[in-house]
Image: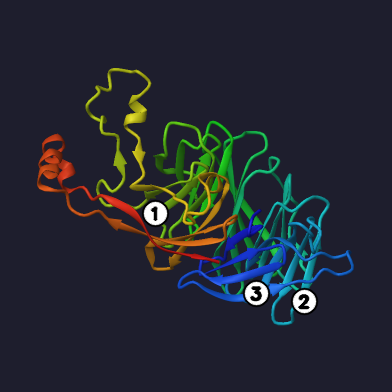
Amino acid sequence: MSKFNHVSFNQDDSCFSCSTDNGFLIYNTFPLQRKLVQKFEAEDNLKGKSIGMTELLNRSNYIAMVGGGSSPRYPVNALIIWDDLSKKETIRLNFMSIIKKFFISRCFIIIVLEKSISIYKFAKNPIKLCDDFEIPINSNVDFRTSKETDDQINGIICFETVKNRGQVRIVNLTLKNDKLMTNSIIFKAHKTGINLMKFNNQGNMISTCSKKGTLIRVFNVHNGQLIKEFRRGLDNVTIYGMKFSPQGKTLAIVSNKQTLHVFKILNDKNDNKVHVLNGIIPKSINWGVTNYLESTWSMCKLHLQNSKLSQTDKDLEEDRCKIGWCHNDDDDSFVLVWLNRGIWEKYVILEKKPYTVSETLNQSINNQDSFNDKKWEIIRESWRQL
């Protein structure tokens, strides 16, 4: 049984919310501190007490939520905006199908349904701003506010196109005087269907991974140009978590094999790794492996371990975590929050200790450039039971 039905970080990762079968909790990400506990009581079997999903608006008193769990307090097709100051719901939006995901910002409410996306202006009486966008069934969507001024708000939303799988559409949203203007670009990201898409905080890059989970690509948001391509591995996996660091210099991903990879987007020379046989096998020999050998790999990776020794490896395999970064000006420390076990873990990315003399000599003989290569590792600093 899961301790949390859902976990989500707010827009700058400074807080995260946890949905439970009794209500929801809000925590400060780092240092870890519980900020709010909201428990609901069942009302005459007509209204339960469990919450399926929550989303905190920045560090404000507004929390968006949807019913779910063992005894849903709200329908799964209704979005509720909860005001923690008044301890009551202030906005309700009802839909004809299940709400799969949602985003809130100071001016936008984005609702992801099974086959469409609805966009509203955040107000006491929300205004629908445009016709729905059609999406493939249960596909991934991401949204970020990109720029705000006194009289204009800009946001960006991305989703896979319906007719051509593996193709990404990015829509720029400009809200001025309650009128929404949109323009979009479309580009091919993968040969197969897309599993995850994620914007960076600055709103100028988007990362994508296919359902195979072997390749991760980073594109320019404005023109769809490929910036980086990374290889996670050769075997197929499901990548269920992906997030840029605050400054957009690194990208962390986690797969259903519970392996965490960190890729360097804006890197010094040779921060990311290449295959040891790259440059040894001639390119003229085409065994279908040359592209594999020339791939750029993660700068560091870690197979995640079970923090609670009383639980089995199966408990870890079936669990899922959410990634959040610790500081807005720090690309080297992050936390994982696990849904089933209710565990918070803090990790840091550190440069590895220098090679021994024999290792250094061996490296310099095989590859002169590797003498100056930086090697990185992921270290778990601490963990807590939530």
Q: Nearer the viewer, mark 2 or mark 1?
A: 2
Q: Name the residue under label 3.
A: 37
Q: Is residue 223 visible?
A: no
Q: Earlier in the sequence, mark 3 or mark 2?
A: 3
User: Which residue type carries mark 3?
Assistant: Val
**Along the viewing direction, whichever of 223 and 30 lies nearer the viewer:** 30
The reply to whether dot 3 and dot 2 touch (C-beta < 8 Å) is no
Q: Distance between the residues labelled 2 and 1?
A: 39 Å
Residue displayed at 45% across by 55% down: 244
Q: Earlier in the sequence, mark 1 or mark 3?
A: 3
Residue 3 appears at what percent x and percent y?
63, 59
Mark 2, residues whose alpha carbon is within 10 Å: few (<14), some, or many (≥20)? few
Q: In what element is the residue under mark 2? A: strand
User: Which residue type carries mark 2?
Assistant: Lys
Q: In what element is the residue under mark 1? A: strand
Residue 250: which disc? 1
**Along the viewing direction, whichever of 165 and 386 lies nearer the viewer:** 386
Q: Earlier in the sequence, mark 2 or mark 1?
A: 2
Q: Name the residue under label 2.
A: 88
Residue 259 appears at what percent x and percent y?
44, 45
**In the rendered image, the vertical position of residue 39 relative to residue 261, given as above or below:** below
Within the image, what quadrant is residue 380 found in? bottom left
Q: Distance between the residues labelled 1 and 3?
A: 33 Å
Q: How far apart are marks 3 and 2 (CA)?
A: 14 Å
User: Which residue type carries mark 1?
Assistant: Thr
Q: Can residue 30 be seen in this view?
A: yes
Residue displayed at 69% across by 66% down: 64
